[in-house]
Image (cartoon, coloured by chain):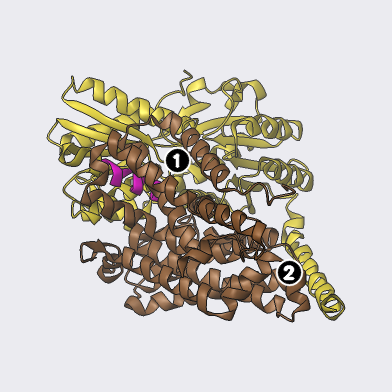
Chain colours: A yellow, B brown
C-alpha cells in the first residue's frame, strides 16, 4: 500500500536529485575556452583539513597573480577518482595544462605523471611518489617532486625543543602516526636521533600509535598518566592533532602547561596552544607556499623560464623549508602571519633544503 | 526492570521453552562477565588500573562513546544500522564551536549554543529516517550518505580549518568535577537514564523491540512502522548531536573530522554488549557494558604495556570472543 502511495513522489524526487547532480557534474561554462590560456590545476585528498585547504588556496593565489584559470580536483581519498579527474582535464585542455598534485597514494603518481607526459602537460608532485620514479625520467614534463619538509629534520627539531623545555632530562612519552605512513616513520626517526644524542638523559617511557587522531591520543595519554604519573616530563607527538589530544588529557588533570607537549604541522589550534603555553612547539609547512610555488615552478617550466632538463637533481626532488613555531618565536610568527609577505613566485629555489633521500 | 532487556525477546511460555529461557538469561549476562574478567586480568597485571584516578579517566574516556551508543542501540534494535555518526558529530561540533567564544570569529553565545548543536543532530537524524523510510533506501546507504553530507557541510562551513574553542564554560563541561567525576561523565549518565526510560516506558521504545523482532507482524497489528523508524533515527541523531557538543568540550576544538574513529567504536561497543545486529535483542544497559568493555580494553593495553603493533589484533580477537560467547547459535538458523 505504502509503495503505491509513495512511488510517484519518490520518482520525481529522484529525478530532481538526478538533474541537480548532472548540473553539478557539468563543467562551468567559462572553462570551455581554457584551451587558449594554460589551465592550472591542483589535486589533493580532501578539503576537510586545514593543510589541504590552505594548499588549494596557495594554488589559487598563484593563479590570480598569473591571471590563469585554475581547477581544484579533490580525490576524496579515492585514487581512481583522482586519476580520472586528471585524465578528464587533460582531454578538455588538450594538454595545455599545469598540474600540482598531492597524490592520494604513491603509486598514483606514476600513472598521473605518465598521462601528463603523454599529453605534453606539465606536472609537479608533492609528498607522495614511488621511490623509483624521478622527474628526470620524464623530461621536460615531470618538472619536480617537492616534500614540503623533511620529517627526520623536523621530528628531531621538535624533540630538541621539547627536551630544552624539560631542562634537558627526564622521561617522555611519544605518540606516533599510522605505522606504515612515510611521514610517521621519518618523524619518529628524527625523534630517536635526538633521544640518542641526549646520551641517556632523556628516556622514552612508552611509544604508542594514535593513528594521527586527537581522540585516540587523548585516551592513550590518560592511560599514560595512570601508568607513569609524574615520571612523565614531556610528550612528543608526530602531529598537532595528537599533541592537542595529549594537552586535553593533561588539562583534565590540571597539568596542561605544566608538562611540555610538541606537535608538527602548524594547524591553527596548535598555534593557539603554543601561544597559550599548553604546547611548546610545532612546525608550519606553509602550505600556501607549497601550493603556490608548486604551480609556479610547473608553469615556468612550461613557458620556458625554467629549463628543467638542465636543472640539477637538487632542484628536481627537494625538501622545502618548514617554519618552526615555538614559545620563543610565537609572537613574531603571529605578527608575520597577520601581515603575510607576498610570495615571490620567481624565487624558485630559495627554500630548497636538500635533495630527497631514500632509505 | 533491567533483566528483561538483557534477555532475548519475550521468553517462550512452554515447558521446554523455560530451560531455553534460562540459558538465554545466562547468556545475557556474558558481556558483564567478560567485563569483570577483563578488569580482573588487567588489575592483576597492572595494579594501578583500579586506582581512583584511573577509574575517573576511564569513565571520562567512555562518556562520548556512551552517548553515541544511546542512539545507536535503538537503531540496531530495529535491525538497521546507522553510519552517519561521524558526520552528525561533525555538524554538531562545528556549529557549537563557531557559536561559543572561539579563535576564529567574535561569537560568544555561551552554553545556549549547545541545544542548537543537539537540534542540528536531531534534524540530520530526521532526514536520515525520512530518506530511509520514504525513499525506501536501506539504512546502511541512507545513513552513509547523510554522514558524508554532514562532513561535507562541516567542511563547507569551516573551509577545512579547525576552530580552537576558548569559552571556559564549554571546557568546564569536560573538566569541572562534581562528586569526583568530570561533568561529561554525569551528562553521559543522564543520557543513559533518558535512553533507558525511552526504551522501557514509551511506545517508541517498545515498538522498536517489536519491529526488530518481526516487522510483518507489527504491520499486521497496525504499528505505524514508518513513523517508528523515522522516530528512532531522529532520536539517534539527537544523541549524536549531543555527542558532537561533548566532543567540543572534551577535545577543545571543532573541525570536520573530529568524530573520526567513533563509528566503529560505537558499533563494536553495542554489539559486544549483546545487542544483536539482527534486531530485537539487547538494550541500553547492554550497551553500557559494551562501551565499558571497549574502553577498559584500550586503557588496559596501554597500562599492561602491550606493544602497539599487537594492540589492534588483540582488540579484534577479544571482540570476536566476546560475541561468540554471547551468541545463541541454536536460535540462529541463517547467518547473513
Q: Nearer the viewer, residue A152 or B12?
A: B12
Q: Nearer the viewer, residue A131 or B315?
A: B315
Q: Quadrant of residue A254?
A: bottom left
Residue B324: x percent and y percent? 57, 42
* A252 left or right of A323 in image: left
Q: Nearer the viewer, residue A80 or B302?
A: B302
Q: Name the residue located 22 percent from the left edge and 47 percent from the top edge.
A: B51
Q: Is residue A217 magenta?
A: yes
Q: Name the residue located 71 percent from the left edge and 76 percent from the top edge.
A: B226
- Tag 1, which secondary structure? loop
Q: Which residues are magenta?
A: A214-224
Q: Name the residue located 73 percent from the left edge and 63 percent from the top edge.
A: A24
| Residue with the most extreme left position | A167
Residue B56: x percent and y percent? 26, 55
- Mark 1 vs mark 2, foreground winner is 2
The numbered mark 2 sits on a residue in which chain?
B
Q: Which is the main secondary structure of the residues drawn in magenta?
A: helix
Other residues around mark 2 within 10 Å, as few (<14) / some (14–19) / many (≥20): some
Which residue, given by chain and number where applicable, does mark 1 sit on? A211
Alpha carbons under labels 1 and 2: distance apart: 41 Å
Other residues around mark 1 within 10 Å, as few (<14) / some (14–19) / many (≥20): many
The numbered mark 1 sits on a residue in which chain?
A
Q: Is residue B179 magenta?
A: no
Residue A339: x percent and y percent? 33, 57
Q: Which mark is residue A247?
A: none
Q: Name the residue located 30 percent from the left edge and 63 percent from the top edge.
A: B174
Which residue, given by chain and number where applicable, does mark 2 sit on? B215
Please tell me how many numbered marks the rendered image carries.
2
Residue B101 appearing in the image? yes
Amino acid at each position: 500500500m505504502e509503495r503505491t502511495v509513495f512511488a510517484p513522489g519518490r520518482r520525481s524526487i529522484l529525478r530532481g536529485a538526478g538533474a541537480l547532480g548532472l548540473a553539478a557534474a557539468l563543467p562551468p561554462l567559462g572553462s570551455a575556452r581554457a584551451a587558449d590560456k594554460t589551465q592550472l590545476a591542483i589535486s589533493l585528498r580532501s578539503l576537510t583539513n586545514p593543510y589541504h585547504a590552505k594548499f588549494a588556496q596557495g594554488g589559487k593565489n598563484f593563479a590570480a597573480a598569473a591571471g590563469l584559470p585554475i581547477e581544484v580536483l579533490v580525490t576524496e581519498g579515492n585514487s581512481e577518482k583522482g586519476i580520472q579527474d586528471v585524465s578528464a582535464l587533460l582531454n578538455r585542455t588538450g594538454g595545455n595544462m599545469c598540474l600540482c598534485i598531492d597524490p592520494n597514494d604513491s603509486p598514483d603518481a606514476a600513472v598521473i605523471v605518465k598521462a601528463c607526459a603523454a599529453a605534453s602537460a606539465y606536472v609537479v608532485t608533492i609528498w607522495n611518489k614511488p621511490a623509483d620514479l624521478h622527474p628526470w625520467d620524464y623530461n621536460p614534463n615531470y618538472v619536480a617532486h617537492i616534500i614540503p619538509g623533511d620529517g627526520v629534520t623536523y621530528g628531531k627539531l621538535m624533540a630538541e625543543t621539547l627536551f630544552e623545555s624539560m631542562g634537558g632530562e627526564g622521561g617522555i612519552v611519544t605518540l606516533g602516526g599510522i605505522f606504515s605512513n612515510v611521514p610517521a616513520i621519518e618523524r619518529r626517526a628524527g625523534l630517536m636521533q635526538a633521544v640518542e644524542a641526549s646520551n641517556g638523559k632523556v628516556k622514552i617511557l612508552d611509544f604508542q600509535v594514535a593513528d594521527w587522531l586527537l581522540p585516540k591520543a587523548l585516551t592513550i595519554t590518560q592511560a599514560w598518566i595512570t601508568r607513569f604519573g609524574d615520571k612523565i616530563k614531556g610528550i612528543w607527538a608526530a602531529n598537532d592533532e595528537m599533541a592537542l589530544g595529549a594537552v586535553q588529557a593533561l588539562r583534565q588533570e590540571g597539568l596542561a602547561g605544566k608538562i611540555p607537549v610538541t606537535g608538527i604541522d602548524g594547524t591553527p589550534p596548535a598555534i593557539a596552544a603554543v601561544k597559550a603555553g599548553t604546547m611548546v612547539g610545532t612546525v608550519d609547512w606553509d602550505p600556501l607556499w607549497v601550493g603556490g610555488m608548486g604551480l609556479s615552478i610547473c608553469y615556468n617550466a612550461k613557458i620556458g623560464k625554467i629549463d628543467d632538463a638542465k636543472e640539477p637533481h637538487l632542484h628536481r626532488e627537494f625538501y622545502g623549508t618548514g617554519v618552526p613555531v615555538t614559545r620563543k618565536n610565537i609572537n613574531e610568527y603571529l605578527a608575520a602571519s597577520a601581515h603575510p609577505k607576498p610570495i615571490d613566485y620567481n624565487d624558485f629555489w630559495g627554500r630548497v633544503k636538500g635533495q630527497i633521500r631514500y632509505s | 526492570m533491567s533483566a528483561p532487556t538483557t534477555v532475548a525477546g519475550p521468553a517462550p511460555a512452554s515447558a521446554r521453552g523455560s530451560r531455553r529461557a534460562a540459558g538465554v538469561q545466562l547468556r545475557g549476562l556474558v558481556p558483564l562477565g567478560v567485563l569483570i574478567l577483563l578488569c580482573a586480568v588487567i588489575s592483576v597485571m597492572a595494579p594501578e588500573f583500579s586506582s581512583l584516578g584511573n577509574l575517573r579517566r576511564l569513565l571520562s574516556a567512555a562518556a562520548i562513546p556512551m552517548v553515541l551508543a544511546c542512539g545507536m542501540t535503538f537503531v540496531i534494535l530495529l535491525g538497521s544500522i546507522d553510519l552517519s555518526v561521524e558526520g552528525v558529530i561533525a555538524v554538531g561540533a562545528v556549529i557549537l564551536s563557531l557559536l561559543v567564544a572561539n579563535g576564529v570569529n567574535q561569537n560568544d553565545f555561551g552554553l545556549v549554543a549547545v541545544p542548537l548543536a543537539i537540534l542540528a543532530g536531531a534534524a540530520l537524524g530526521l532526514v536520515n529516517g525520512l530518506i530511509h523510510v520514504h525513499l525506501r533506501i536501506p539504512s546502511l546507504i541512507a545513513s552513509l550518505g547523510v554522514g558524508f553530507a554532514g562532513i561535507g557541510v562541516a567542511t563547507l562551513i569551516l573551509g577545512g580549518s579547525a576552530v580552537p574553542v576558548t569559552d571556559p564554560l564549554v571546557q568546564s563541561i569536560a573538566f569541572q568535577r562534581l562528586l569526583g567525576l568530570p561533568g561529561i561523565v554525569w551528562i553521559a549518565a543522564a543520557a543513559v537514564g533518558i535512553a533507558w526510560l525511552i526504551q522501557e516506558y514509551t511506545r517508541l521504545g517498545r515498538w522498536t523491540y517489536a519491529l526488530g523482532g518481526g516487522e510483518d507482524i507489527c504491520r499486521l497489528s497496525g504499528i505505524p512502522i514508518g513513523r517508528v523508524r523515522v522516530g528512532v533515527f531522529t532520536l539517534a541523531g539527537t544523541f549524536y548531536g549531543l555527542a558532537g557538543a561533548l566532543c567540543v568540550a572534551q577535545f577543545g576544538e571543532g573541525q570536520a573530522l573530529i568524530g573520526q574513529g567513533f563509528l566503529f567504536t560505537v558499533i563494536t561497543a553495542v554489539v559486544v554488549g549483546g545487542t544483536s545486529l539482527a534486531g530485537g535483542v539487547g538494550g541500553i544497559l547492554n550497551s553500557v557494558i559494551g562501551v565499558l568493555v571497549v574502553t577498559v580494553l584500550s586503557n588496559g593495553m596501554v597500562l599492561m604495556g602491550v606493544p602497539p603493533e599487537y594492540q589492534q589484533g588483540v582488540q579484534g580477537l577479544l571482540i570476536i570472543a566476546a560475541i561468540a560467547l554471547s551468541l545463541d547459535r541454536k536460535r540462529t538458523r541463517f547467518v547473513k
